[in-house]
Each structure stands twice: as C-alpha cells, then as structure tokens.
Amino acid sequence: MNTETYIQYGIPSDWVKIFETKNISATTFKNTPLKQLVDKYGIEESQAKFVKDCLKRTPIDEEIAQQLLERNRYVCCLCKGQKSDAYIIHHITPYAKTQDNSYDNLAVLCPNDHDLAHREGQNLTNKISPEQIKKSKENWEKEVEELNVRIASQNGEISEADFINIPRVVELYFRLYKEVPNTKYSEELKSRLFLNQNGNINHKFLNWTYGNTVTPFMSFDPLDNATLSLHFEEVFIKILAKIEFTDLDLLLNKTSLKNDNLVGKFCFYVGGLYGNRPILPIDEKTQCCHLYFHRGKFFSEWIVDPKYLRSSSSIDRLANRTEYIVYGRIRSIGEKEWKRKKYIHYDIRPYLFGLPTKTKSRRPLIHYIDKDEYYDEFE
Ligand SMILES: [Zn+2]
Ligand SMILES: [Zn+2]
C-alpha cells in the first residue's frame, strides 16, 4: 500500500487509513468510476469526489513531502495535534491558483484547521489566513528541531566521539551507580589488561601520566583504541539515562543568573565553536585547549584536556568542525572581559564531545575561525 502517494496528493491521513483497510490504492481510486467507489467500496460520494479531484493534481515531490512531514513531526502546525492526530498537506497559496508544490508553499494541518483555512464566501468566522499558517509553520518547525536535538542528545546519539574525559566520566558513573562501569567491552578490555580484573581502569598499563605518549586513546593500535572509546562512550550513555542534560541555549536566555543556581547544572550544547588545537606531541606539559563561543552578553567556554582526545584525527578536527555536541557541567559563572567587552562567563567542564546526529539551523550561524586567528584572539 502506498500511504505516501495519497499524502502527496493532499489527501487527509485519516481517509488514507480507511482506503488502506479497503485495499484501494491511489491508482485504483483514480481508475474506478465514482458510482463504483460509492456502491462497491462504501465511500461517501462527496469524499470520493474530493479525492478524485486531488488525484488529478501533480503530486508533491516525495522528498519534499517527507521532509515537510518530518520537520513537522506529522502533526498540524497550528494546533500541534490537539484537535486531531490526522494530518493533511495543505497549499498555503491554493493549488488551483499557482500549482505551487514547493516546500515554502506547503504546510501540515489537521482536517479541522484545514477546513478553517479553506473557509470562503459568507462564513469567514475563525478563518485561518495564509500568513497565520506561514508563521505557525516556521515556529513549529523550529520547536520540532529543538525537540529533536534534545531527544538525540539525551539518547547519546553521537556519530563520532572526539573526546571523552575518562576520569570525570567514571567519577560521575560511580556517584550514580556506586559500582564499577561495566559494558559489553569490559571482558575484552580486561583480557587486554586495559582494565583490572575488578573492571577499574589499569592506570599503570594505560600509562597516561608519564612517558612520551600520555593519551590513553592513542597509546595502542587503532583497534584497541576503538574498543576503549566505545567502552567509555557506553559508560557515558548509561549516565545519560540517569541525568537530564539541559540545552545550554535555554540557560543562556536566563536573565537572573543569581537566583537560578546554575552552577553544577548538567548541560549540552549543539552548534559551532571556536577553538584551538594542542601542540603536538601531547605530553604532560601540553596546554589545555579551549572551545568557546560568545553570543550576546554570554561567553561559554570548555577547557579541554588534550590527553583525552580520541585520535589524531580528533585533534585535526578540533577547531575545524562546523558543529559539535558537547556534554558538560557548569563549573562556575563569572565575568570575563574580552576584546574590551564584558561578558557573563560560563566555565563548563566537558565530559564528552563529538559530532551530533541532529543539529539546529542557527541565525546567525556560529562557526569556527581558523587557528592563526584564534591565537590572536586568545592569548
Ligand atoms: Zn490543527
Ligand atoms: Zn488545503
């Protein structure tokens, strides 16, 4: 059955469900005479007529329909599904006028609000205007985007972790679970002596505090590194199941910082960052890197211990990524003067960061400056 096909012609999803149970495809519908649709399939005449008219149109491009529905969570952008779960793709400027099937001219509405949008003639009570629909669509899509980012972040949907602060992550785990972190990689890591028999990290073996190579993720062959990082990624995802991380964007909208007690709060951030790479080789004297951005009166900064960078490509990516997801905890909030401007400074301890699977479209876009510029800016 092809639900999508019907939807692409602007037919309400609740009707489509009925047609599906009656086993009528869009093609069958198109080719079956009206009388037969009524007599044989028991479809109401006015409904059959409406659908037949819709099926005469040029269907909306499959990809556009899909994108629109996903970006609206398959829910009416006006009532957000309060009036009905059913949805219909509506042409903001009527199809009859312009045949415009482009993304900008389409909106997801419920049948109820769809009727109100199409109200004409004498009865214009509660008529919904195209401008109202446009505005609601824009706002709802933004809300959905933020919701998707929040869900993905809380689920630990990271496509590539570039940094995991092992001791901090383990410390947090202990506080929550009061036991040794255990994952499906534990046994293998024990057999390779990266972990002790009790599951603790074998500090001596990892040797990250002395010698030339002090980065635990980079001391061994790539296969071992991968297992090690997957282990700690999984440990962190278990933490995510227990602690709610707040979107930093929400915290940066707070006006009364004193009353909100934000220090100690767990937060995540998805977006572009400024930053610098560590100077190689990484040893005990290597300075910490800074990841930061400033927006309005706020300056957020994560101090990154380069020891826990995942791989040499993670180092390359640092200050080169257009987007990051960073999980952290607010260590302190103070003042910072920078380039003769005063900011409210958030010092956030990073636990883990990497590439997000869901991102936000930001205006203005936050993006990186290159390394040389960074050193000028940040002494
Ligand atoms: Zn609605
Ligand atoms: Zn419509």
Image (spheres, rainbow, N blue to C red):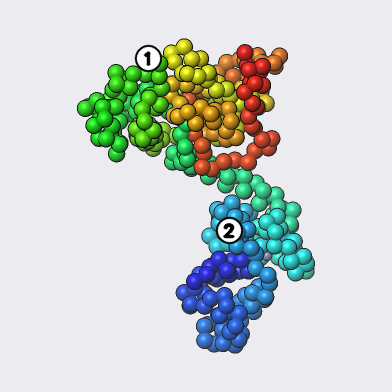
The image shows residue 68 at horizontal and vertical percentages of 61, 55
The local secondary structure at tag 1 comes to: loop
Residue 225: image quadrant is top left
Q: Which mark is drawn over residue 66?
A: 2
Query: Is the residue 34 above or below the residue 258 in the image?
Result: below
C-alpha separation, residue under disc 2 versus residue under disc 1: 54 Å
Kindly tell me whether mark 2's CB lies below 8 Å from ligand 2. no
The image quadrant where one finds the C terminus is top right
Q: Which mark is drawn over residue 267?
A: none
Q: Nearer the viewer, residue 204 or 137?
A: 204
Farthest left residue in view:
197
Residue 94: image quadrant is bottom right
In the image, what residue occupies the spot 65% across and 46% down? 139
In the image, what residue occupies the spot 68% across and 70% down? 58
Query: Is the residue 182 above or below the residue 23 in the image?
Result: above
Ligand number 2: quarter of image? bottom right
Left or right, 187 with reference to 10: left
Q: Amino acid at mark 2?
A: Gln
Q: Amino acid at mark 1?
A: Gly
Mark 1, residue position: 211
Mark 2 vs mark 1: in front: 1
The local secondary structure at tag 2 comes to: helix
In the image, what residue occupies the spot 46% across and 34% down? 161
**Mark 1 crowdedness (10 Å alpha carbons): few <14, some 14-19, many ≥20:** few
